[in-house]
Image (spheres, rainbow, N blue to C red):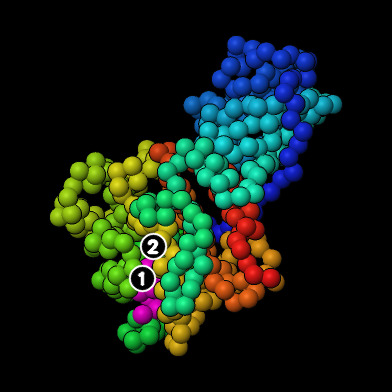
C-alpha cells in the first residue's frame, strides 16, 4: 500500500432529488444511473457525458476526455474519472444544476457516497472537475457493521485493548476469528523475523542487501530508483517495507533471513494456522501465482499443500512476468494471498512491540514513521501502522498508545470479488477515523 497522507473528508452537500428542470420520474435512458440528468444546458450535457463515460466498459482515455474538457483539465479529469470507472456501476442519487455548474450526488456499489462538481466555460467545456467523498456517519459499533455489511465485502474489524503480557482483549468487533486476506499486513511477520534475527545477532541493521533484477520485478515504491547491483541496509529495507509497503524490500529481507525465519515468526506471534503459510510465500512467488504468466490460479485453488509447495518452487525457476489481463482481478478468489484473522493481527502487533527492545528497539520507530491516519497526537502519542491493498483486498491495522499509556489495536479487513479504486481506501479510512473516536480511552 502506498503512503496514505490522511483521511479524505468532505462536507455533504444538500442533495436534490430532482433535476434542474423539476422532473421527478427517472427517464428510461437514465434507469441504469438512477436520477435523471437533464441535458438542455451545457453543464447538464457534460454531467450526462460524465456518467456515460464512467459507466462504460471502455476505459477513460485522453481522446474522449478532450471532447468535454479544456486542455489544462484533461489529465486531472482522466485521473478522477478513472477512479469512478473502476468502481462502476456508479448510481446517481441526486442532481443539482446551477449557473454553469452541475453537482451529481453518486454512490458506488460498495456504498461510498461522492459528489461530482463540474463547471463549464463559455464554450461548454469543463474547466473545473472535483470529486469529493461524503463520509458515512459512525456513531456506535453497530454502525460499522451496517456500513461494512452493505458494502458487499467479506469483512472483519476489531478494536482490542492490549493488556499485560501482550494479551488482546476485544472491546468491539465482528468476524474476528475469520481468516481473510491480509494483503501487505503480512509484512508485519517479516518485520518480526527481522527483529528476532537482530536480537540474536544473526542480522544487523547496517547489513547491506544487494538489489537484483528479480527483486525489482515485483515493484518498489520507495527504492525504485536504485539499479540492480546497488545496496540498501536492512534498516532502510525494513522501513520501506512498512512505510511504503515496498515489495522489493520485502523479498530482499526474506531472502536474507530465509523463509524459515518468517515461519517461526508466525508461530511466535500466535498465528492461528502457521501451516497454511508454510513454506512462507515470497512476493515473487505469490505474485507469480496470482498475477503472473503462466496462469496458475486454478491449479493453486485445486492443489493440496504438497501441490502448492510444488507450484511455489515452479515460480522460483523463472522470472516474474505479470499478465496484463489479470492485473486488476483478485487472486484471493483462488486462495492466492497471505491470510490471517483480526485476532492474528492484534497478536502480531503486540508481539512486535514486545520484541522492540535492545538492539531491536528501532522496530517501534519503523512502525510509527507513517501513522496512516490523522488523530489528535495529544490523545494518541504513539501510532504504529501497517495496511495493504491488493485487487479486491483492502486492509488496515494500527497499534496505538493513548495518553494514559494504554495500547490498543484497531484493524479492518475487507475482501471483494472485484478490484476497487483508491476511493475505497479513503472511504474506509473515514470509517476508521470515527472508530478511533469511539475507543473508550480514559480521561
Relative to residue 371, is residue 378 drawn left or right?
right
Identify the disc placed on residue 239.
none
User: Which element carries disc 1, helix, strand or loop?
Assistant: loop
Give, as a single range, the part of the protein colored magenta.
189-196
Whether the residues at callouts 2 and 1 have beta carbons within 8 Å, the answer is yes
Q: Residue at x 63, y 37 (%)?
A: 113
Q: Residue at x 65, y 27 (%)?
A: 93
- Is 343 located above or below residue 418 in the figure? below
- Between 443 and 239, the one lying in front of the other is 443
Q: Of helix, strand and loop, which mostly describes the magenta segment?
A: helix
Q: State which quadrant residue 62 falls in.
A: top right
| Residue 250 visible here | yes
User: Which element carries disc 2, helix, strand or loop?
Assistant: helix
Q: State which quadrant residue 371 falls in.
A: bottom right
Q: Which residue is mark 2?
A: 344
- Between 396 and 313, the one lying in front of the other is 396
Q: Which residue is mark 1?
A: 269
Q: Position of residue 347 (x, y in %)?
A: 41, 68
Amino acid at each position: 500500500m502506498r503512503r496514505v497522507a490522511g483521511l479524505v473528508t468532505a462536507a455533504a452537500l444538500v442533495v436534490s432529488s430532482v433535476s434542474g428542470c423539476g422532473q421527478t420520474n427517472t427517464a428510461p435512458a437514465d434507469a441504469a444511473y438512477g436520477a435523471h440528468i437533464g441535458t438542455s444546458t451545457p453543464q447538464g450535457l457534460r454531467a450526462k457525458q460524465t456518467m456515460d463515460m464512467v459507466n462504460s466498459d471502455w476505459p477513460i482515455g485522453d481522446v474522449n476526455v478532450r471532447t468535454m474538457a479544456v486542455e489544462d483539465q484533461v489529465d486531472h479529469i482522466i485521473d478522477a474519472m478513472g477512479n469512478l470507472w473502476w468502481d462502476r456501476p456508479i448510481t446517481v442519487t441526486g442532481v443539482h444544476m446551477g449557473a454553469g455548474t452541475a453537482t451529481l450526488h453518486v454512490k458506488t456499489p460498495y456504498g461510498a457516497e461522492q459528489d461530482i462538481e463540474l463547471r463549464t466555460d463559455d464554450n461548454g467545456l469543463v474547466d473545473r472537475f472535483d470529486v469529493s467523498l461524503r463520509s458515512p456517519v459512525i456513531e456506535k459499533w453497530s454502525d460499522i457493521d451496517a456500513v461494512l455489511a452493505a458494502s458487499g465485502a467479506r469483512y472483519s474489524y476489531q478494536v482490542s485493548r492490549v493488556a499485560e503480557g501482550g494479551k488482546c482483549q476485544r472491546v468491539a468487533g465482528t468476524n474476528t476469528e475469520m481468516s481473510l486476506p491480509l494483503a501487505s499486513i503480512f509484512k508485519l511477520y517479516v518485520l518480526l523475523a527481522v527483529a528476532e534475527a537482530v536480537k540474536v545477532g544473526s542480522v544487523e541493521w547496517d547489513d547491506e542487501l544487494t538489489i537484483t533484477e528479480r527483486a525489482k520485478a515485483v515493484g518498489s515504491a520507495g527504492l525504485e530508483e536504485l539499479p540492480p547491483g546497488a545496496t540498501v541496509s536492512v534498516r532502510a529495507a525494513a522501513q520501506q517495507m512498512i512505510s511504503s509497503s515496498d515489495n522489493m524490500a520485502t523479498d530482499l529481507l526474506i531472502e536474507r533471513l530465509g523463509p524459515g525465519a518468517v515461519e517461526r515468526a508466525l508461530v511466535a506471534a500466535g498465528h492461528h494456522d502457521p501451516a497454511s503459510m508454510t513454506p512462507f510465500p515470497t512476493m515473487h512467488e505469490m505474485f507469480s501465482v496470482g498475477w503472473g504468466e503462466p496462469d496458475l490460479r486454478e491449479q493453486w485453488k485445486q492443489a493440496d499443500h504438497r501441490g502448492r509447495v510444488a507450484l511455489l518452487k515452479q515460480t522460483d525457476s523463472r522470472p516474474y512476468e505479470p499478465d496484463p489481463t489479470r492485473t486488476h482481478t483478485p487472486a484471493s478468489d483462488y486462495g492466492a494471498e497471505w491470510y490471517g484473522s483480526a485476532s492474528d493481527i492484534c497478536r502480531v502487533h503486540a508481539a512486535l512491540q514486545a520484541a522492540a527492545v535492545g538492539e531491536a528497539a528501532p522496530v517501534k520507530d519503523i512502525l510509527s514513521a507513517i501513522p496512516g491516519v490523522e488523530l489528535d497526537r495529544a490523545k494518541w502519542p504513539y501510532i504504529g501502522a501497517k495496511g495493504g491493498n491488493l485487487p479486491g483486498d483492502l486492509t488496515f491495522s494500527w497499534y496505538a498508545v493513548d495518553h494514559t499509556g494504554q495500547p490498543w489495536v484497531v484493524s479492518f479487513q475487507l475482501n471483494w470479488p472485484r478490484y476497487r479504486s483508491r476511493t475505497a481506501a479513503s472511504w474506509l479510512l473515514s470509517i476508521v477515523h470515527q472508530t478511533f473516536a469511539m475507543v473508550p480511552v480514559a480521561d
